Amino acid sequence: MSVIVVGLNHRSAPLELLERVTVPPARLPKAIADLRARDSLDEVLVLSTCMRTEVYATAERFHPAVQDIRNYLCESSFSAPEDVADHLSVLYDDAAIGHLFSVASGLDSAVLGESEILSQVRGAWEVARAEGGAGPVLSGLFRHALEVGKRVRSETAIARGTTSVSQAAVALAVDTLGPLHDRKILVLGAGDMGEGMAVALAASGVAEVLVANRTRARAQGLADRIGGHAIGFDELAGALVEIDVLLSSTGASEPILTVEDLIPVLSARSGRPLLIVDVAIPRDVELGVRQLDGVTVLDLDDLRAFARSGLEDRRREVARVHGIIDEEVADYLGDAQARQAAPVVSALHGKAEEIRLAELARFRGRLEGLDPRQQEAVEALTKGVVAKLLHEPTVRLKDVAGTPRGERLAETLRSLFDLG
């Protein structure tokens, strides 16, 4: 049974394709159910963020499993196979495990060392467990990945400075406009990303922050936390006339703001420029808005370019992080191999102990004349013979557990000793 990961991320695919394949939180249960319905897949987990959509799975047959996941990504995103194939990343076993540990450590993020990915990994695992997708293998793997992510951040400086997409979005606005203290800013969306942007704005001393969300109560809760003001979606048009900056990250499947929406807003602004930082996937702002006079739209592509600069201190930590990841991959594989060998080893030793006890019982009449000391010697002798006979097969099986040869040896032992 191999662990595989198939998907697309910000390094392998353009933003337009990432938008199409993204799986919103509300669709995750259905995605897991659809994938588990494929015969080639056993355990399944979907990790979908603004930077990646990846399917982690366990499977006995590698190629059919990859094909089934590829087909699902194409079908769910209404994409042609040729549009997806060139951008698809496929990893298995050691490479898949190392990739997940890199993701949890923030090495594979647009903002190096970003912290939001840990909660996203945990959230994906929790959904997969609740939906029956994550069994013992993926649950053990993702539990270990979370521990790796925490260790990396405690033992290295990879998370020093601006280390979240939401913080980077605010920093990008500052880089574009200068200090935001006297600016009026609207945060559209009160999910994890919106909350992160609102908190970052409040921490930077912005005087006035508005929060809008489809659920007014959630917007109000976030606004109360940061000392801002909540507005409803029905108040968006009026707010857009007044604000200087819009930071947007909703979970909408279609653009929230279109060219048609923005034309009257820009007219009412009388030439005052509007900056929009859209970090949603799919994007909240229609592409055509970029062509309108008086508005500047920045998205995740701009954020990635911005985040690549000024990271020398954290880049120097990358080698240390890779060292930790290599160590943790080896530890995980060692533990996994031991776990895979354990049932067969236990059954083998159990069968041998049954035979030993049965033979002692068969000769009980001949042994009754022995004194206690002699009986203890017979007990020790028979145990020692069994242990010595089983020692070499046990060691060899543990050494190759988790490999094709290990599977063959385990199956041979089951067959030869009728272990079931």
Image (spheres, rainbow, N blue to C red):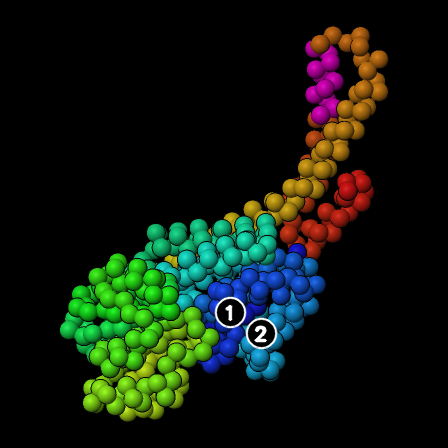
| Callouts 2 and 1 close, C-beta under 8 Å | yes
Which x, y percent locates residue 268?
A: 23, 88
Which x, y percent locates residue 151?
A: 39, 51
Give the main secondary structure, helix, strand or loop, of the magenta stretch.
helix
| Residue at left offset 59%, top offset 54% | 132
Residue, far left = 182
SS for callout 1? loop
Label 2 and label 1: CA atoms lie apart by: 9 Å
Would residue 402 be found to the left or right of residue 104 on screen? right
Residue range of the region highlighted in magenta in the rendering: 373-383
Q: Earlier in the sequence, mark 2 or mark 1?
A: 1
Q: Looking at the picture, does residue 254 appear above or below residue 393?
A: below
Which x, y percent locates residue 258?
A: 38, 84
Q: Which residue is mark 1?
A: 23
Q: Quadrant of residue 362?
A: top right
SS for callout 2? helix
Which x, y percent locates residue 368?
A: 80, 10
In the picture, the quarter occupied by the C terminus is top right
